[in-house]
Amino acid sequence: MSSSSTSALPRSQPAVVTAAVDWLICLQCDPTPAELARWQAWREACPDHDVAWQRVTSMSQVLDAHAAKLPGALASQVVEQISRSHSGRRRVLLALLGVSVTGALVAVSGEPAPWRVWTAAYRSGVGERRLLTLEDGTRLMLNTRSAVDTRFDAQARRIVLVEGEIQIESGQDAAGRPLIVETRSGFVSPIGTRFIVRQLGDEAQTHVSVQEGAVRIQTRLGGTELRLNRGERTSFDRYSVDAAQPSPDNADAWTSGMVFADNWRLGDFLSELRRYRRGFLRCDPAVAELRVTGAFPVQDTDKVLRLIEKILPVRVHTRSAYWVTVGP
């Protein structure tokens, strides 16, 4: 096995690269002798397997040594995702290994390809809220870590939510073109309205809440539809739409830089807070079921963590600015 780690990846075989990543994850989980034998047999079965293996292991070493030093938003994404779980590490490795695995990444996870986020027309950074006015007068606010594309033509005005959370106040189009918000799950069409749409990278569902007017939701597959009225919320995936539920009054609190928690699990609260800060924020399972209620400004997440330490029987353990654990 003399292939160099700098050899070209087998671009015509994204499944080979995916398999190499899966074997790496397997070997990091105390493999059995039988698993080690199968890995060895896989690696020796084809030269492409060894090329992919060496490239994947090289990339893994780079992540371990230099994740926090990567530039900008990519640094926080890498540190967070490779630390969260083996599945997170798998996603990051596949993403960083480039175009040869893009198809496999989308097929396996259903998440947006990373290039879609990084090349979107409008993006917000970590902790940033961004307010835009589109050419038709529609007002669009992006929450933290969000990405949007717009596609306006003679037939329709499309806002494509690539990642994150947005609030839309629909404008009146002189040409009468319909406004359509598109997500991986389907389509949301406003009826003179103000509403919020959210779909994070690792979520199969899109979440919608209506503050004014109404919207019509249609799934991407199956053709299921639902009208959602003011004060209602729902979630939907590609095939089905959940029944409408009352929306909390503070559903748009993030537009003012706040997170309102109403008897949330601490684990869920920290998952939400994580979106507003760089690096890795972990909740120890021993304290994840503690309950949080309150209004928290997210401009200073370190201050929020200090407050949580005061109101709950927990401690905040800081290894670095990019690595924080909340535990007993």
Image: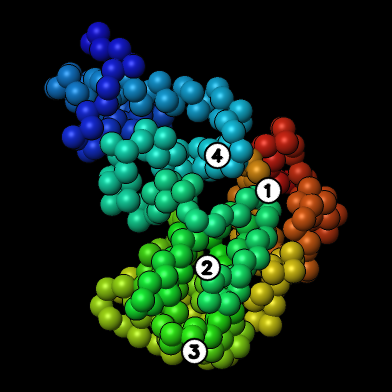
Residue for badge 2: 198
Q: Secondary structure at mark 4?
A: helix
What is the quadrant of residue 123 in the picture?
Answer: bottom right
Tell me: 235 left or right of 38.
right
The amino acid type, in three-letter code, at marker 2 is Arg
Q: Nearer the viewer, mark 3 or mark 1?
A: 3
The amino acid type, in three-letter code, at marker 1 is Arg
Q: Position of residue 17 (x, y in %)?
A: 27, 33
CA distance for labels 3 and 4: 37 Å
Q: Could you tell me which residue is drawn at 43 percent across and 46 percent down?
A: 114
- Residue 74 bears which disc, if any? 4
Mark positioned earlier in the residue sequence (3 or 4): 4
Q: Are marks 3 and 1 in contact (CB under 8 Å)?
A: no
Residue for badge 1: 277
Tell me: 205 left or right of 22.
right
Mark positioned earlier in the residue sequence (4 or 1): 4
Q: Quadrant of the N terminus?
A: top left
Residue for badge 3: 191
Residue 202 seen:
yes
Q: Position of residue 218 (x, y in %)?
A: 36, 80
Neighbours of disc 4 within 10 Å: few (<14), some (14-19), many (20+): some
- Colouring scheme, one of rainbow, by chain, secondary structure, one colour: rainbow
Neighbours of disc 2 within 10 Å: few (<14), some (14-19), many (20+): many
